[in-house]
Image: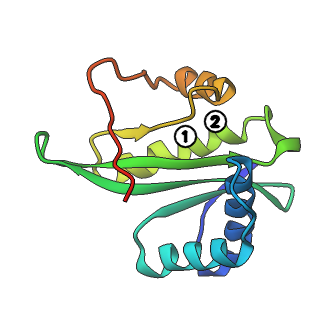
C-alpha cells in the first residue's frame, strides 16, 4: 500500500472518493459538485489531500485544512475527512493515511492535528484512539449554521 499527496492530476480519483465519502454521510451523490470542490481545493492550495493506493487502485483518502492557534501561536491541521472504500476497510489504509497526515503536519511545523467524527462512528474512533488521539474533555464545540 502506498500513500501519495494529491495533485491536479489526481482530480478525478480524489473527486470520486470524496463523492463516495459524502454519500456515506447521507448526502446526495454529486460527482460534478465533488469535482468542482476538490478542484478548487487543489488549485487554491488550501487543503492537503492524501490518497491511499493499493495494487494500482486508489481506495481511500484524507483531507486536512490548516488552522491556527492564537493562544499557542502556531499552525495546526484539521483532519476533516477520512474515507476508505467499503471493501478495503480493516486492511490498514486508514492507519497509513493517519501516519502520513501526522508526518505532513510535523513537516509543516504544526503543533497538533485535530479531528471530529460522528458519535456513532465507533470503528473510526477505535483507529483514532489507537493512533493516540484523545477525546477532548476540556472544550465544547458549538456550530452556527449560516
Query: Which element type, helix, strand or loop, lies under badge 2?
Result: helix
- How many marks overall? 2
Determine crowd level at label 2: few under 14, some 14-19, many 20+ residues with C-alpha closer than 10 A.
Answer: some
Asked if residue 24 is positioned above or below residue 45 in the image, the reply reads above
From the viewer's perspective, is 43 left or right of 8?
Answer: left
Q: How does the figure colour the protein chain or chains?
A: rainbow
Q: Residue 65, image x and y in percent?
A: 41, 57
The residue pinned by badge 2 equals 95
Query: Which element type, helix, strand or loop, lies under badge 1?
Result: helix
Image quadrant where residue 93 sits: top right
Could you tell me which residue is drawn at 37 percent across and 49 percent down? Answer: 77
From the viewer's perspective, is 71 left or right of 131?
Answer: left
The answer, for residue 60, to whether it is visible in the render is no
Q: Residue 51, image x and y in percent?
A: 66, 58
The C terminus - image quarter: bottom left
Could you tell me which residue is drawn at 80 percent across and 37 percent down? Answer: 89
Asked if residue 44 is positioned above or below residue 122 in the image, the reply reads below
Could you tell me which residue is drawn at 48 percent across and 62 percent down? Answer: 48
| Of 25 and 134, the residue lying toward us | 25
Check if mark 1's residue and mark 2's residue have beta carbons within 8 Å: yes
Residue 125's disc is none
The residue pinned by badge 1 equals 99
| Of 138 and 76, the residue lying toward us | 138
Q: Residue 120, image x and y in percent?
A: 63, 26
Q: Residue 84, image x and y in percent?
A: 74, 46
Could you tell me which residue is drawn at 57 percent across and 72 percent down? Answer: 38
Amino acid at each position: 500500500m502506498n500513500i501519495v499527496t494529491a495533485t491536479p492530476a489526481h482530480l478525478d480519483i480524489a473527486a470520486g472518493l470524496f463523492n463516495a465519502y459524502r454519500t456515506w454521510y447521507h448526502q446526495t451523490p454529486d460527482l460534478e459538485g465533488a469535482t468542482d470542490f476538490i478542484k478548487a481545493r487543489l488549485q487554491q492550495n488550501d487543503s492537503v489531500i492524501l490518497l491511499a493506493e493499493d495494487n494500482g487502485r486508489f481506495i481511500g483518502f484524507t483531507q486536512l485544512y490548516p488552522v491556527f492557534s492564537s493562544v499557542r501561536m502556531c499552525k495546526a491541521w484539521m483532519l476533516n475527512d477520512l474515507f476508505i472504500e467499503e471493501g478495503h476497510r480493516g486492511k490498514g489504509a486508514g492507519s497509513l493515511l493517519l501516519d502520513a497526515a501526522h508526518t505532513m503536519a510535523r513537516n509543516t511545523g504544526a503543533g497538533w492535528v485535530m479531528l471530529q467524527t460522528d458519535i456513532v462512528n465507533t470503528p473510526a474512533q477505535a483507529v483514532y484512539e489507537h493512533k493516540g488521539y484523545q477525546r477532548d474533555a476540556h472544550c465544547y464545540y458549538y456550530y452556527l449554521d449560516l
